[in-house]
Image: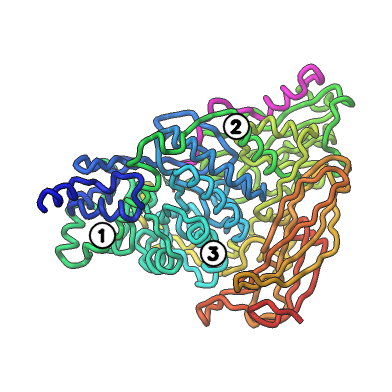
Amino acid sequence: MDSNKDAEDNFTLYLDPSAPIEARVEDLLKRMTLDEKCSLCVGKSFWKTRPVKRLSIPSLGLTDGPHGVGPHSSGWKRNTYFPTLICMGATFNRQLAKQFGTALAEETRACGKHQILGPGMNIQRSPACGRTFEYLSEDPYLNKELAKEIIAGIQSRRIAACAKHFIVNNQETRRFGVNVNVSKRALHEIYFPAFKAAVEEGGVWSVMACYNRINGKLGSEHQHILKDILMDEWGFRGYVVSDWFATKGTSGTSDVVNAGLTLEMPGGILGIKRLKKKKIRAAIERGEVSESTLDENIKRLLRVMFLVGLFDDESSIPPGSRNTPEHVALSRKIAEEGMVLLKNNDSTLPLNVDEMKTIAITGPNAGKKKGMWGGSSEVWPPFEITPRDGITSRVKDKLRVVSDVQQADAVIYVGGLGHKSGQDAEGSDKKSLELPKDQASEILETVRANPRTIVVLVSGSPVAMDDWIDQVPAVIEAWYGGMEAGSVIAGIIFGDVNPSGKLPITFPKKLSDSPAHASERTFPGILTKRRFWQRISNKPTKPVDNVYYDEGIFVGYRHFDTRCIEPLFPFGHGLSYSTFSYGPVTMKRKNSEGKARMEVFITITNDGIVKGSETVQLYVTDVESSESRPEKELKGFHKVHLEPGEGETIRFNLLGEDFSFFSEKQGKWILEPGEFSIKIGASSRDIRQEKRVTILDTQLHVK
Ligand code: BGC
């Protein structure tokens, strides 16, 4: 009997890789002392958790960031620099998003890490946000469709993804603690969808709480947001990590633990240590925290430790790899599909090398590398091809590169932004959309000297172009296109690559046209004056700064279209060297597994003479509604790759939720029967086909 019991005790179920994960979690948890559990609540250092030697629990290694494994968190390793997430957003390509996630995970594993701190999933509420380049889109549907694929890719390699920053971290100004006043409806319709899908459809293993307050409470101690919504409503089973130093302004240990936050980061001498052993113990003794709540938080982290294979033999875990030719090729492919041809008058592009003798390459970004800097998302690649390098090598032995723009057969002006404070960088926002320094006048001078001037913008967010756009025949938005960006820019200029990127964000004519910029109150908020030391410390401000999301659900094109404001370039816009025609729309109601859906069919044909890709976008308009709704909302997209003359019939599936809105009054999503319009087009402002339909009920019966 006794010997049986001994055998039972010695059998460490949690170390058995063939046992179910939940059984391993339970087994390990019951062996842990209170102190051991507490020790898992604060990181050991900046980038890892504390090991528990007695139980052979190793450290879980975390690393930044969204578009490549950061050097600062990987022991200064050089890794593949993928295009930043705004460029990924512009690809509108789910498959590519998954491949990207998979490659990111392989790089993470090869750096000896188990979790990557991405994707960045905040909505691009304002083009002025310093981290716009790190996020995917202003649109909740595009955001969720790509984010869940990235997550699926990452986790397919048993690396934990981390959906960040939960939630409404939409500005960098006073990000440590600014109080975001946002309606329930805007949360549900705009800001939640990607995170909800990450949990419900992507099964994400980790979520990073935000720095800011949401309707009065900091993200790290927001019981309603973390417990009630993320965990209880959506069924999140992974663990919540704080953003770095975010626990500083929290009210206390018990609030953070009770909100469901498991891991406070970073640890080490610089850490805040709200979740220090002593403090948690004291909170338990005071009866403010129950041990079962702590257990639940710990279980979440242990679950992820098992999922990433922390206790398993290396041979059973998907292997890692870094800087492989495949990863570099993928980085290039994302850039090829994400760069956007904004303007191309009279087919200025592509340039034909055979008809030219000289070319000039100028502008402040022509020779700049962009991987490093920008904040936590920086990547240090083994090489990076600048626009000048890429173009020069493409025209080698064919054209003479000259510096006198007047002597050139064409001029490539590479301008845009950089990862500097006040531009595309973490920790600060842009004050305006104007190009820095004298770029606007330089462009005008250049185009005056040589009308065949092509502007290439290297930036991670929209810039103003009103001063010069009418004089320039062609403009490419190249984003921060990863380590191969220069070659891809050259490929687009000379027609080796047929551009197919579409804007995932509206380019306004001026910042004040943007919905978040009605007043200071709406961006960056009503700020308290602070002394110098207060400004440089990360302490959330007291009294609290407030920003008001008065625009509600009217974010991005929802605002521009509903209020009839002409953008510089609309959401979804992007040109190609091919032309595509859109056939008539047909619809069919279907019912499978008790769920009604409306199938929408359209045939797209490449009428051009080169092969190309088109992103076909489907928008829904609620023609009549009891509550105000946007003029249109994206509810489907397909990217099709077509040879010249080739056509393809695409099917969209619309569900009841695609016609619904979140009613603030009723506190739930509702579908109001009535007339809807289905719009299909090449951008939000280039609708090619429209079909009206009267929906009779939630089962999508139509008249
Ligand atoms: C950023 C996070 C990042 C973390 C660790 C924070 O300042 O907001 O996105 O993952 O630092 O570098």
Spatial CA distance of label 3 from label 1 is: 38 Å
Pinpoint residue 701: horizontal percent, then vertical percent. Answer: 70, 79
How crowded pointer 3 is (Cα within 10 Å; few <14, some 14-19, many 20+) is rated as some
Front: mark 2 or 1: 2
Can the viewer see residue 667?
yes
| Rendered-image quadrant of the C terminus | bottom right
Residue under circle 3? 522
- Of badges 3 and 2, the one in the foreground is 2
Nearer-N-terminus badge (3/2): 2
Q: Which residues are magenta?
A: 375-401
What residue sits 81% from the left and 65% below the top?
A: 585
* 123 up-or-down from 66: above or below: below
Label placed on residue 153? none
Q: Is residue 583 left or right of residue 628?
A: right
Q: Is residue 631 visible?
A: no
Q: Amino acid at mark 3?
A: Thr
Where's residue 113, x and y in %?
Answer: 40, 38
Q: Residue at x 64, y 77 (%)?
A: 628
The secondary structure type at the circle numbered 3 is loop
- Amino acid at the residue labelled 1: Leu
Residue annotated with mark 1:
294
In this rendering, position of residue 268 left or right of residue 304: left
Residue denoted by label 2: 326
Q: Nearer the viewer, residue 303 or 627?
A: 303
Sequence-wise, the earlier of marks 3 and 1 is 1
